[in-house]
């Protein structure tokens, strides 16, 4: 069996490329929670988990660059969804594995990437994603970088749904039932306020 990939072989990208419709169209990663942008909380959780970090953003790129990480936009125009973000990340990464998390889940498990990596290797999968409370969290995943050509073909064919593309590959669902709230995403001002109380 292959060894679990070392953190230096993993690039982790925070996806902040969406339109934030349910947050009134604002850039969700920059929405403040207790005086800090939401992406700052997410960075705290993931920084030790991978050797290389970057941010995928399609607007406010100068603001995101202030966090001291490379910022890349989608290669496909028009806010075409998270698969387009993953595609940009896979193109930019120089490591054999890429992990993604969204910018609006700031309470991520501190062992998220390690558990995804273990499952990917043990199950001989091409990608592994988190599952908790009976729901697959498709934007919390680890991917082999050699999936790029297939994802390129899928996007060119019009695919925009992560789970539909995942189903065409060898993929693993990794049980995080011990931390179901870790994957709650913040989509509305009310959810932001509730998160502030919990933090």
Image (cartoon, grey):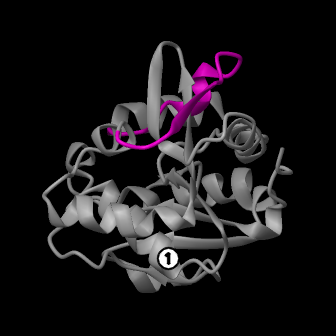
**Label 1 belongs to which residue?**
64
Identify the image quadrant of residue 179.
Answer: top right
Give x and y (percent) for residue 97: 64, 63
- Spot the residue most to the front: 1
Q: Quadrant of the C terminus?
A: top right
Give x and y (percent) for residue 78: 14, 70
Identify the image quadrant of residue 175.
Answer: top right
Say whether residue 104 is left or right of residue 79: right
Say whether residue 168 is left or right of residue 140: left
185 to 66, vertically: above or below: above
User: Over which residues does the magenta segment extend?
Assistant: 168-188
115 to 135, vertically: above or below: below
Magenta stretch: residue 139 in it? no
Q: Secondary structure at mark 1?
A: helix
Residue under the image location 54 percent in, 55 percent down: 100
* Mark 1 Cα-neighbour bin, 10 Å: few <14, some 14–19, many ≥20: many
Residue under the image location 54 percent in, 25 percent down: 131
Give x and y (percent) for residue 157: 14, 60
Residue under the image location 51 percent in, 81 percent down: 92
Can the viewer see residue 17?
Answer: no
Residue under the image location 32 percent in, 45 percent down: 165
């Amino acid at each position: 069996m292959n060894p679990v990939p070392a953190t230096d072989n993993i690039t982790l990208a925070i996806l902040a490329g969406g339109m934030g419709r349910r947050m009134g169209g604002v850039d969700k990663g920059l929405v403040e929670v207790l005086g800090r942008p939401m992406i700052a909380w997410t960075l705290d959780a993931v920084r030790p988990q991978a050797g290389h970090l970057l941010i995928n953003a399609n607007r406010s790129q100068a603001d995101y660059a202030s966090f001291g990480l490379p910022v890349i936009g989608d290669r496909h125009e028009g806010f075409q969804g998270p698969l387009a973000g993953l595609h940009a990340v896979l193109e930019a990464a120089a490591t054999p594995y890429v992990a993604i998390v969204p910018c609006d889940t700031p309470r991520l498990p501190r062992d998220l990437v390690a558990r995804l990596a273990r499952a990917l290797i043990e199950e001989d999968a091409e990608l592994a994603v988190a599952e908790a409370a009976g729901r697959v969290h498709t934007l919390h995943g680890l991917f082999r970088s050699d999936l790029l050509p297939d994802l390129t073909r899928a996007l060119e064919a019009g695919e925009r749904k992560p789970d539909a593309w995942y189903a065409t590959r060898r993929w693993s669902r990794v049980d995080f039932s011990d931390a179901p709230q870790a994957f709650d995403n913040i989509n509305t001002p009310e959810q932001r306020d509730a998160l502030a109380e919990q933090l």
